[in-house]
Amino acid sequence: MGRIAGRFARVEPRLRAGRLVLGLLSDLPRKNCWTIAEWAGEATPHGMQHLLCRASWNADAVRDDVREYVVEHLHDEAAVLIVDETGDVKKGYVLAVACSAEVPTGAGTFRADALVKKVPKRAWQKLSAGRGAKGQRFYDWAVIDLADPSPGRHQLLIRRNRTTGELAYYRCHSTTPASLATLVKVAGSRWRVEETFQSEKGWPGWTSTRSAATPPGPAGSPSRCWPMPSSQSSAPTNTHTNPHRTT
């Protein structure tokens, strides 16, 4: 808490934030503003709710402080960042997005499910996302370059179920060019991390601490869409046909 102490305008919310963190790390079977307040010796949850919704403290700076702490202690060149539903798309490497997500291209901004209709058959590559309970998880994959103005390489990765045709979409960002095979490997890695994350999500209890004034976000698992009937679109068709190609 010493690292983030200066991010609070008053001492009261700083002390309450400390009690909130301790409550989240406690062995409470269910963690929300009511149970943590009671655990901390407070008569009502109003103080905890005020901290999360109205108190004056720099949430962005606290986020940055926590991120720096994590990097200092858990840094690994092979690490895969998994962003929860409240994450910023530009912070991630491979981030699942909805079929309705709009992405920038050289020909304008398009929905993900509009771009996939323009992917030629030759651009799809059969690749394994890693070993699962029943062996290698093979899917068809394609990637489209995006025209994002921010630094680095930005792409839309598309996964297609070889049996059902079900589609999943991922926004990708890398500081250096990454091949389709590399992006698929990272996407497969995030599934294993997300499975663990979902099973352990109740332990720190962040999803339970939202107060009534803060609506929950959408599910954090990859967003999937079934194939839609083809329609006319002026979306670009610049796709990679070689799974190991880097440009």
Image: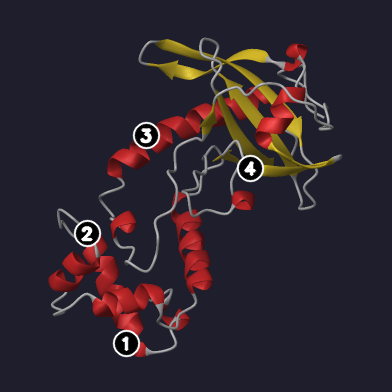
User: What residue does disc 3 label?
Assistant: 195
Secondary element at tag 2: loop
Q: Position of residue 115 (x, y in %)?
A: 73, 31
Name the side, left or right, on which 84 lies relative to 179.
left
Residues under numbered marks 4 and 1 in contact, where contact means CB atoms less than 8 Å apart: no
Spatial distance from mark 3 to mark 2, Cα to Cα?
21 Å
Q: Residue at x 17, y 65 (%)?
A: 35
Which residue is disc 2 drawn over?
31
The Cα–Cα distance between marks 3 and 4, rounded to whole angstroms, is 23 Å
* Residue occupied by mark 4: 101
For image coordinates 41% across by 31% down, the residue present is 192
Crowd tier of the residue under label 4, counting other residues whose Cα lies within 10 Å: few below 14, some 14–19, many 20 or above: some
Q: CA distance from mark 2 to mark 1?
A: 21 Å
Quadrant of image for the C terminus: top right
Q: Residue at x 52, y 72 (%)?
A: 61
Q: Quadrant of residue 213?
A: bottom left
Neighbours of disc 3 within 10 Å: few (<14), some (14-19), many (20+): few
Labelled pair 3, 4 in contact (Cβ < 8 Å): no
Q: Name the residue tied to disc 1.
A: 12
Badge 3 vs badge 2, beta-carbon distance below 8 Å: no
User: Whole-Å distance between the Cαs marked 2 and 4?
Assistant: 32 Å
Q: What is the three-letter code of the residue carrying label 3?
A: Glu
Name the disc covering residue 102, or none: none
Q: Nearer the viewer, mark 3 or mark 4?
A: 4
Q: CA distance from mark 3 to mark 1?
A: 37 Å
Callout 2: few (<14), some (14-19), or many (20+) C-alpha neighbours within 10 Å? Answer: many
Question: What residue type is disc 4 on?
Answer: Ala
Image-based side of 76 in relation to 234, left or right: left
4 vs 1, front mark: 4
Q: What amino acid does circle 1 point to?
A: Glu
